[in-house]
Amino acid sequence: MIVDLAAYERAADQVTGSVELLNEALFGPSPSAEALVAELDGRAVGFALFHSTFSTWECRAGIWLEDLFVPQEHRRSGVGSALFRELAAITINRGCSRLEWTALNWNEPALRFYEKLEAKRLDDWVIHRLDAASLVRLGSDPSP
């Protein structure tokens, strides 16, 4: 489903992870992420991958939803809503202050779905990223 998600997001060529890396991230000695998997008749029909965040202003943890994906044939069946309900319950039960995620600006079906959930769009924040090459350059720069 991860490859299907990447294809849907028009980025299939950017998947560089492996089953081994995912297994380590989810089940290794120091897990860095968690996942919910929705099943129907013993078959996976969606997933939500998430990890912890922290709010400096609130001095409390939060949850970052990295990805939520439901294959086309299972959309509009309640799978996405069920995943969000469970993730909201986890967020509350852990005493977290917020659940956050991003969405591609062209993904109208997702944006409409999040609007129905009454999610607040934060248009005044801009995402930044340092990729692996930039991290190496920056991390090895001896400049003060």
Image: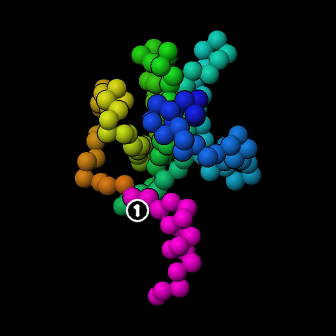
Q: Which residue is located at x 69 percent, y 53 percent?
A: 30
Can residue 93 be spotted in the picture? no
Is 106 drawn above or below residue 59 in the view shown? above
Residue 132 magenta-highlighted: yes
Which of the two residues, 50 or 13, is positioned nearer the viewer here?
Answer: 13
Type of amino acid at the residue the image marks with label 1: Thr
Residue 138 screen position, x and y as percent:
50, 74
Quadrant of res 132: bottom right
Magenta stretch in the rendered image: 128-144
Is 34 drawn above or below residue 52 in the view shown? above
Which of the two residues, 129 or 26, is positioned nearer the viewer here?
Answer: 129
Is 112 drawn above or below residue 41 in the view shown? below
Residue 42 screen position, x and y as percent:
67, 16
Q: Which residue is located at x 37 percent, y 30 percent?
A: 110
Q: Which residue is mark 1?
A: 56
Q: Residue furthest bottom?
A: 144
Residue 73 screen position, x and y as percent:
50, 15
* Left or right of 95 on screen, residue 25: right
Residue 10 magenta-highlighted: no
Q: How is the image coloured?
A: rainbow
Residue 94 screen position, x and y as percent:
53, 44
Tell me the quarter of the image containing the N terminus. Answer: top right
Label 1 packing within 10 angstroms: few (<14), some (14-19), many (20+): few
Is 89 drawn above or below residue 125 in the view shown? above
Can residue 104 be spotted in the picture? yes
Quadrant of res 17: top right
Count of residue discs: 1
Q: Which residue is located at x 45 percent, y 35 percent?
A: 9
